[in-house]
Amino acid sequence: MNKFYGAMLVCMLAGCNGAPRTDAKANNSQADSEPQVSVSDGDLQGRTLQSGVTAFLGVPYAASTGGENRWRPPQPVSAWQGVRNATHFGPDCLQLPPPPMKAPWGPEFLTDNDMSEDCLSLNIWTPSTRSDNKVPVLVWIHGGAFIGGAGGIDIYHGDKLAEQGIIIVTINYRLGVFGFAGHPELATESDYEGQYGLLDQVAALKWVQQNIQAFGGDPDNVTVAGQSAGADSVHALMAYPEAEKLFAKAIAQSGSGMGITHPDRAKAESLGVALQQVLHADNVAAMRALPGKELLENVLNIPVPMALMQFRPVRDGNFSKQRSNKKIPLLTGFTGNENSYFLPEWHVETEDDLRDVIKANMVDDTVTDVLVKLYLQEADTPQNAALQFLRDRALMSLLNWAEQYHDAANILAYQFDYAPPGPPEGFGSFHSSEIPYVFGQLDAGDRQYSTADKALSELLMNRWLAFIKSVKGKVTAADGLPALASGQLLVVGKEGNASAEPVLSEEKIQLFEEALAAGGTLGMFSAEGFH
């Protein structure tokens, strides 16, 4: 399992650091015009792209998080004089690079930008034409297992979506030990230990509310969206009372009910104390005085299994999911092969291997035997049977989550089963594979996308745009997106077709319920994996 976790810590949720990234789309698309906008902290100069879309990049929404600001709520930006250049992405938040590995995520999914603790910036793409200041807004929170990623990754560029009449905002937020550390001393300073990265996201949303009208945006029609760690962040924001008026709708890609565990304050504090001991620091003040790189590298020396992955948001108190706002319209779903990168580590080659995977999650022997037979009938190999079981386990988790914490009438759901072209081949509709299609960024990497891929991208963009542009507070089955309350979801099939289909069969739902009653678990990843 060490290899599995080693991969998870850097590339789970896609958006890891460690591959070349170019800003060519921004740098080479500049037109003669140089748009300027006045925001609360000063004037900005962006650039106009060849498409007519305007881009304002690297705009600070909070002050540097280094030194005395480390492990504190985000602080206000100091106003600047003159016109600030906003034509390049700002530094990424501090993170470790991944080791070499075979994975489905090419350079377009990754980032190798400069890194700094002065990283709380956002990027804005606005449409070329607008009739008034009522343009719908999408705020994107990147994935990366809460330890990697950035808002400037190529597949997150917002120009293609902006061409369709919305404003795109992508953000950076503090990661890992910088965003989610706990410590007894930090508990005496504020009630937000282990939640600093979430507070960054709140600060970015507040900046959008205060300034987006200057870009033509409608602060009353903001959709907050994210994938994987970003999706988990979206749910945290849905449960935070102070964020309630900062957005009208939400999108959680891979997705709702993921099953990611979060440390409580006691666990977060014990981890922070262990870090202090590794650093030979007298107190938090001494830890704040250390260079960020030294602190980050020493996380690997904490004598706790997979210590880097342990710095995740504390989801209690301020961000308790028991308070999730059930009235917020939500678009959510999963890819068909969420686990295709991780499953080879489990060597699922035989029927017994498949039984081991199912038993680890479902516990009940009788249910396990029935599920083994059922999934072997549906799939051509034990490995594909395991992938389908884990996909359905995630879908059952979605149904279970909706019943406990949301309102299925306010949820639109999808399943992305389409396999993008390689290289490398064999990963199917892997974790995060729908993002380039949704953002229209099929030219961001080296994959040989076809005319069919481009048609599928247009199909997905149109469905997401229908939700983003929809009237605040009103959920409809827009352009074929069925409400979860109907028992259906939009399935984007292997041939690029899209149709409404049942979330799960009644037989599978009953089996999962029996397993749950016996102590089984739900979520996106295997019980051997990320629980």
Image (cartoon, rainbow, N blue to C red):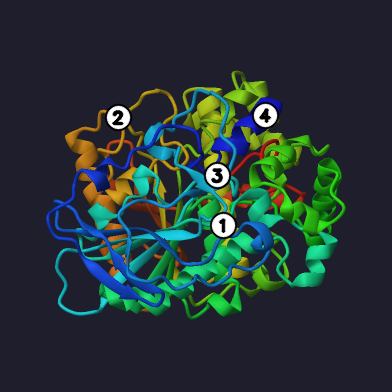
Identify residue type, mark 3: Gly
Residue 447's mark?
2
Nearer-N-terminus badge (1/4): 1
Nearer-N-terminus badge (2/3): 3
Q: Is residue 513 left or right of residue 27?
A: right
Residue 355's mark?
4
Between marks 1 and 4, how big is the CA–CA gap? Answer: 29 Å
Between marks 2 and 3, how big is the CA–CA gap? Answer: 23 Å
Between marks 2 and 1, how big is the CA–CA gap? Answer: 28 Å
Q: Secondary structure at mark 3?
A: loop
Inspect this view and state whether residue 133 appears. yes
Point out residue 379 in the picture as x, y percentages from the top left corner.
Answer: 48, 28
Identify residue type, mark 4: Arg
Instruction: Please rate how many residues cluster around mark 2, counting C-alpha atoms within 10 Å: few if below 14, some from 14 to 19, many from 20.
Output: some
Nearer-N-terminus badge (3/4): 3
Q: Secondary structure at mark 1?
A: helix
Residue sitting at the far top? 349
Residue with the mark numbered 1: 232
Identify residue type, mark 2: Arg
Between marks 1 and 3, how big is the CA–CA gap? Answer: 14 Å
